[in-house]
Image (cartoon, grey):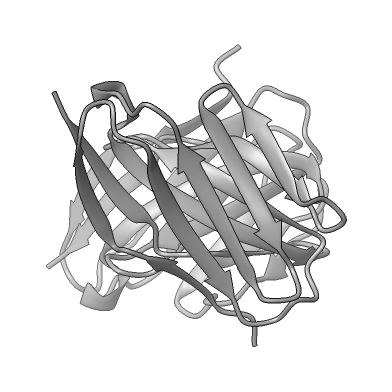
């Protein structure tokens, strides 16, 4: 079992470029999440998907879009990257409630 | 708005010392509180989960306590080891898909 996998591990973008962060889980979880982690701050929820076919905004959704491609995969897209989106992005999955399993993260730098 | 604060932000102790990490939250309306461990370049791993009706949970050398009325939790690590070096985060679950994370305490245990 790979658990939660994320690609890429590192990425450098120029302002205005777009990219998609990929996440997949093999635990048959219904719920999936995208968080960002910034220095001195806790993880903040960007978007979540309660089940296949549904997505909802979290605390900091501006500048991002998501797609729940199927039960396994949940992608995060930056349409026009900005320096304020420099962060470490974590994907998580869970059966619902407080239980979440995290991927290793993607470190994104926007110049 | 629920806020989670962790003090200190960083801690360095010699091997073998017992230590306490602190977590406080502003709204006592929580379902449970979790302590996570985060290693550099890796995702979060859940260590202990305390339900709102519980006072403490133990796992090996770790003991977490919860005082919901005062909005406080502590993580006690006995006989610390260099392998305990990591960032420890606490998070409160407030229902639905809302988990609020603290910024973490970075622990370094010196051999």
Image mark count: 0
Residue situated furthest bottom in the rendering: B1
Residue A85, located in which quarter of the rendered image? Answer: bottom left
- Between A33 and B102, the one lying in front of the other is B102
Residue at x-position 59% and y-position 38%: B63
Q: Nearer the viewer, residue A39 or A22?
A: A39
Task: Give the farthest residue toward the top.
Answer: A1
Q: Is residue B61 left or right of residue B93?
A: left
Task: Locate the C terminus of chain A by quadrant.
Answer: bottom left
Q: Is residue A10 left or right of residue B34?
A: left
Give me the residue at 33% from left, 73% from top.
Answer: A80
Q: Is residue A5 visible?
A: yes
Image height of A30 relative to A5, above or below: below
Residue B32 picture location, percent across and down: 76, 56
- Residue shown at 82% from the left, 65% from the top: B95
In the image, what residue occupies the spot 51% across and 26% down? B61
A102 to B91, vertically: above or below: above
Q: Name the residue nearer the viewer: A9 or B54.
A: B54
x and y, in percent, of residue A18 in the image = 33, 62
Q: On the rendered structure, is A73 left or right of A103?
A: right
Quarter placement of the N terminus of chain A: top right
- Which percent across, then down, holds residue A31? 76, 46
Q: Quadrant of residue A72?
A: top right
Inspect this view and state whether residue A74 appears. no
Q: In the visual, does A44 lie left or right of A3?
A: left
């Amino acid at each position: 079992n790979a658990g939660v996998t994320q690609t890429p591990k590192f990425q450098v973008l120029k302002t205005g470029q777009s990219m998609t962060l990929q996440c997949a889980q093999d635990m048959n979880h219904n719920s999936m999440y995208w968080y960002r982690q910034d220095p001195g701050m806790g993880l903040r929820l960007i978007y979540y998907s309660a089940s296949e076919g549904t997505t909802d905004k979290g605390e900091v959704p501006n500048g991002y879009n998501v797609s729940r491609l199927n039960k396994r995969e949940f992608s995060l897209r930056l349409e026009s990257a900005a320096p304020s989106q420099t962060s470490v992005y974590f994907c998580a999955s869970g059966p619902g409630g407080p239980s979440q399993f995290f991927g290793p993260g993607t470190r994104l730098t926007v110049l | 708005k629920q806020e989670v604060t962790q003090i200190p932000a960083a801690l360095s102790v010699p091997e073998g010392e017992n230590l306490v990490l602190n977590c406080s939250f502003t709204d006592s309306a929580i379902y449970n509180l979790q302590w996570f461990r985060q290693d550099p370049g890796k995702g979060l791993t859940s260590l202990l989960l305390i339900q709102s009706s519980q006072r403490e949970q133990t796992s090996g050398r770790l003991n977490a306590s919860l005082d919901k009325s005062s909005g406080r939790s502590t993580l006690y690590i006995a006989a610390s080891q260099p392998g305990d070096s990591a960032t420890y985060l606490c998070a409160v679950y407030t229902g639905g898909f809302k988990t609020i994370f603290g910024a973490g305490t970075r622990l370094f245990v010196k051999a």
